[in-house]
């Protein structure tokens, strides 16, 4: 990989992992449009480590609170709001894990194309626009089991490239009456177990196949994706209530339109 490829791909992962624009779609596009070679499994693991580090660091206080609450409950010292939310994060993760195990091969063979990305980018962007008009005032403590299962099932749709895991979970949260900030924060918490799972699976595969990875690319990928992801989360949450989701909707529609034109011209 060239330094340009390393920097661009790490920035794409860091900036799009938590925004409602689909990181998987953006990581597929350079090879589809620019003809870049696949970045390789080792680099995929590296940028996942980077984005995971960013979200763990940013939500460290929340995670300590949720973990301690969960431990208190399982050790018989009583349930709490924190333990309840911790169980909800686990519960909402299950549908995506099941869907990934059952449908991963089909998705890899049939859905990782520029046309699918374009259609998903546009359609789920429009759905996000509609949901942004439904925004309510519910906070994360107001979530119930039905809400969590709906968000979890919506998250499973993110296996389709172009959907955006963060985008579809925020969309579901908005439809359920969550505030923009609550929908975003719960979406970010949900990202943690999935990023860990994806990183572990890729790491196991990497260990089985072996690697002749370029360590400069690995370390640069971790660092760039971590810094860009942390800044992205901070800025996104700071300005979300002011700007809403429409800038991301417009971006998705433009990107999807450009992709459709590219597909039909090629």
Image: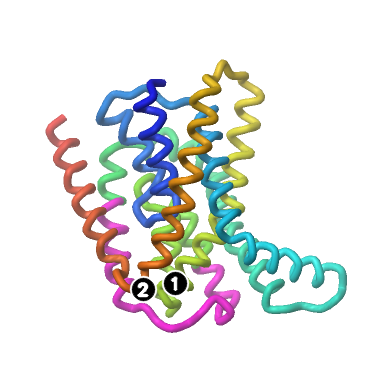
Residue to which mark 2 is pinned = 241
Q: Position of residue 128 (x, y in %)?
A: 32, 65
Name the residue furthest top: 212
Q: Which mark is residue 181?
A: 1
Q: Quadrant of residue 7?
A: top left
Badges 1 and 2: C-beta atoms under 8 Å apart? yes
Q: Position of residue 217 (x, y in %)?
A: 49, 26
Q: Position of residue 9 (x, y in %)?
A: 39, 34
* Badge 1 element: helix
Distance between mark 1 and mark 2 Cα atoms: 7 Å
Q: Main secondary structure of the magenta part?
A: helix
Pointer 1 local density, CA inside 10 Å: few below 14, some 14–19, many at least 20: many
Instruction: Find out whether residue 139 is within the magenta segment.
Output: yes
Instruction: Find out whether residue 68 is within the magenta segment.
Output: no
Q: Residue at x 49, y 31 (%)?
A: 220
Q: Is residue 167 above or below residue 134?
A: above
In the image, 46 versus 124, the foreground residue is: 46
Viewed as shown, does residue 140 lie left or right of 265? right
Q: Position of residue 52 (x, y in %)?
A: 56, 47
Q: Is residue 117 above or below residue 74?
A: above
Q: Residue at x 65, y 31 (%)?
A: 204
Q: Which mark is residue 38?
A: none
Q: Quadrant of residue 87?
A: bottom right
* Badge 2 element: helix
Image quadrant occupied by the N terminus: top left
Q: Residue at x 61, y 37 (%)?
A: 201
Which of marks 2 and 1 precedes in the sequence? 1
Region rendered in magenta = 121-150
């Amino acid at each position: 990989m060239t330094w340009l490829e390393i920097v661009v791909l790490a920035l794409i992962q860091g900036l799009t992992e938590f925004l409602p624009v689909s990181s998987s779609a953006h990581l597929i596009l350079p090879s589809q449009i620019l003809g870049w070679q696949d970045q390789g499994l080792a680099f995929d693991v590296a940028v996942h480590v980077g984005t995971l580090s960013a979200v763990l660091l940013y939500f460290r206080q929340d995670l300590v609170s949720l973990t301690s609450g969960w431990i208190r409950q399982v050790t018989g010292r009583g349930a709490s709001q924190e333990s309840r939310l911790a169980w909800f994060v686990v519960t909402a993760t299950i549908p995506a894990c099941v869907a990934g195990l059952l449908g991963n091969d089909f998705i890899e063979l049939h859905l990782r194309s520029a046309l699918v990305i374009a259609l998903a980018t546009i359609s789920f962007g429009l759905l996000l626009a509609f949901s942004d008009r439904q925004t309510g005032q519910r906070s994360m403590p107001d979530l119930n089991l039905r809400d969590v299962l709906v968000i979890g099932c919506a998250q499973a749709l993110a296996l389709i490239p172009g959907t955006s895991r963060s985008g579809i979970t925020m969309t579901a949260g908005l439809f359920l009456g969550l505030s923009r900030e609550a929908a975003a924060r719960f979406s970010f918490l949900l990202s943690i177990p999935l990023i860990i799972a994806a990183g572990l699976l890729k790491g196991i595969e990497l260990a089985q196949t072996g690697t002749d990875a370029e360590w400069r690319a690995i370390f640069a990928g971790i660092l760039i994706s971590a810094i860009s992801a942390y800044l992205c989360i901070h800025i996104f949450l700071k300005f979300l209530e002011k700007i809403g989701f429409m800038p991301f909707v417009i971006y998705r529609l433009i990107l999807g339109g450009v992709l459709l034109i590219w597909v039909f011209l090629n």
